[in-house]
Amino acid sequence: MNIPNNWLIRNASAIMTGLSGSEARIAGPDIRVTDGRIAAIGRLEALPGEALIDARDCVVYPAWVNTHHHLFQSLLKGEPQGLNQSLTAWLAATPYRFRAAFDEHSFRLAVRIGLIELARSGCATVADHHYLYYPGMPFDGAAILFEEADALGLRFVLCRGGATQTRQLEADLPQALRPEKLDDYLADIERLTAQYHDPASDARRRIVVAPTTTLHSTTAEELCETARLARRLGLRLHSHLSETVDYLDAARAKFGMTPVQFCAEQEWLGPDVWFAHLVKLLPEEIRLLGSSGSGIAHCPQSNGRLGSGIADLPALEAAGVRVSIGVDGAASNEAADMLSETHAAWLLQRARKGEQAKPRYAGGTFEGGADAASIEDVLRWGTAGGAQVLGLDALGTLQVGQAADLAIYGLDDPRYFGLHDPAIGPIACGGRASVKALLVGGQRVVVDDRLPGLDLAALGREANAAVLQLQRRAGVRR
């Protein structure tokens, strides 16, 4: 990595901090970055050797922290067989059906596309739940993920997924769905930890223990072993949970308890644990998650696309659950970037509450749900909340002493014209605001809405060719 530059960001129209309450906004209008950290915020004069970024008519946010992704799915967007399926049928129709079709080149390309998409939305930290593992795999997906993130200058958290047992729906699918042995899985966690894991609060590389699902991918005894290994190594824990009602049915049928109770029995709750989705929860499960300080990666677009539902973030947060936002895989999202994700989170929390409104003659007490989530809430979940869930406490907020991970958005598209409050534009107006600059640890990753050296047209052509190749390998008839 290059040595971070020193910057003076001048004349921002608005600065959102990622903090709550009265600290959610700060006047600025200038931000000084020295040796990769925020050194001052206020009305500042340039110092010798500082490079200037003119943020006039721009909005500054903390860079997004994406806490749940499946980057390999970047080449599976809009796949027809899964497009109108709910979760279980979609898994068989799309991600499982195409697993064996990925080789090293197509995997690397998918990762690159997903990371570029995220960077161009103002995201600096990516936690990828990488579960594309099977015995005798011909390439090292973990190495590729870290290499591609490093090449773009992004922080990367590898959530090492995988399965030691498979669902029945996978029985007739390709050899690439064979489960791993637990000893091999645990040994690889130790290898990856020794090679990549950095426990620092501003780490650029982290490892997380992340069996693909707690209910379906491993046994209860093995789940306990993964939790104990993670805590011995100082790693966090992550998995999918309660995405649909199938989790409730499966947990009762297999274990005679709820999904969250099952996780508690296997030592899979706590402030070092976060789960993706948590859409279908019983009230006692929310209390258990909250009392343990566990976290959520809320994925509203995927949950909407698959018809799974909408997680109740206000109830979860009120109970003590740590809230963050993830984009999930592009095969169930089609636009895996943090601006569209946070826009969806803002709208859907309000829609969820509004659906509960009743007429007064039937006992109703409110008309709609517009108070369910503010722009400031959503920004906090997608920045400070994500950093908290990942244990990266030096990230996620714009404060003196914090790492200089920040996005400067230009509101130069007609969709932002006429805004009374420019600060809310990148989230409230939808679309993709142009990124004048994305700084990651003080290094400028995006320059005037471009990644230096990137030919987007060439990348698009390469992606089209790769999709055709994946379809041929998977036996898709055209």
Image (cartoon, rainbow, N blue to C red):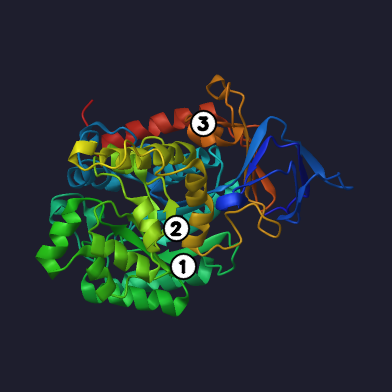
Circles 1 and 2: CB atoms closer than 8 Å: yes
**Residue at the spot of label 3:** 432
Q: CA distance from mark 3 to mark 1?
A: 35 Å
3 vs 2, front mark? 3
Sequence order check, earlier mark of 3 and 1? 1
Q: Amino acid at mark 1?
A: Leu
Residue 299 shows in this picture: yes
Q: Of 264 and 478, which appears nearest the observer?
A: 264
- Please identify the quadrant where the N terminus is shown: bottom right
Count of marks, rendered view: 3
Q: CA distance from mark 3 to mark 2?
A: 29 Å
- Tell me if 409 is positioned left or right of 227 in this view: right
| Secondary structure of the residue carrying numbered label 2 | helix
Sequence order check, earlier mark of 3 and 2? 2
Q: Which mark is residue 142?
A: 2
Q: Of 349 and 96, which appears nearest the observer?
A: 349
Q: Amino acid at mark 2?
A: Ala
| Secondary structure of the residue carrying numbered label 3 | loop
Q: Is residue 121 above or below residue 199?
A: above
Q: Amino acid at mark 3?
A: Arg
- Tell me if 34 is positioned left or right of 179 in this view: right
